[in-house]
Image (cartoon, helix red, strand yellow):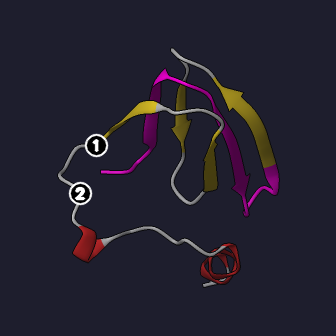
Amino acid sequence: SKDPEIFFLISGEVEMYAYDGRSKEELRTVLKPGDQLNISPGVWHEMKALTDVVFIEYRESVFDPANEDTIRDKEKYQQWLNF
């Protein structure tokens, strides 16, 4: 359900950082209301709220916290890339 992850910012401002470990490309940007961001599979990303925010994450299935597909640590992400 996260292929790609799609975020739509309704209100507020978010600082976004994304890193593709395969291509070594980086993105740093500030999202504003009305912005949509598509994150491809396998791209590390972080968001920092600069204000109170409301956003939608589009999903094809219900989120299951027992079967999470998130890598929270950037070092573990680097290890995941090397498998």
Q: Which residue is mark 1?
A: 59
Q: Which residue is mark 2?
A: 63
Q: Which residues are magenta?
A: 1-25
Q: Quadrant of residue 69?
A: bottom left
Q: Is residue 17 magenta?
A: yes
Amino acid beneath label 1? Arg
Q: Is residue 9 magenta?
A: yes
Task: Say which element carries label 2.
Answer: loop
Seen as rendered, the residue at the extreme left is 62
Whether 45 is drawn above or below 79: the answer is above
Amino acid beneath label 2? Phe
Packing grade of label 1 (10 A; few <14, some 14-19, many >=20) is some
Q: Residue at x 67, y 41 (%)?
A: 16
Cβ–Cβ under 8 Å for marks 1 and 2? yes
Main secondary structure found in the magenta portion: strand
Whether 21 is drawn above or below 75: the answer is above
Measured from the top left, where is residue 66 in percent x and y? Answer: 23, 76
Whether 72 is drawn above or below 75: the answer is above
- In the rendered view, does 40 fall on the left or right side of 60? right
- In the rendered view, does 70 fall on the left or right side of 33? left
Q: As rendered, which of 5 and 52 lies closer to the eye?
A: 52
Q: Residue at x 44, y 44 (%)?
A: 5
The C terminus is located in which quarter?
bottom right
Q: Residue at x 51, y 14 (%)?
A: 34
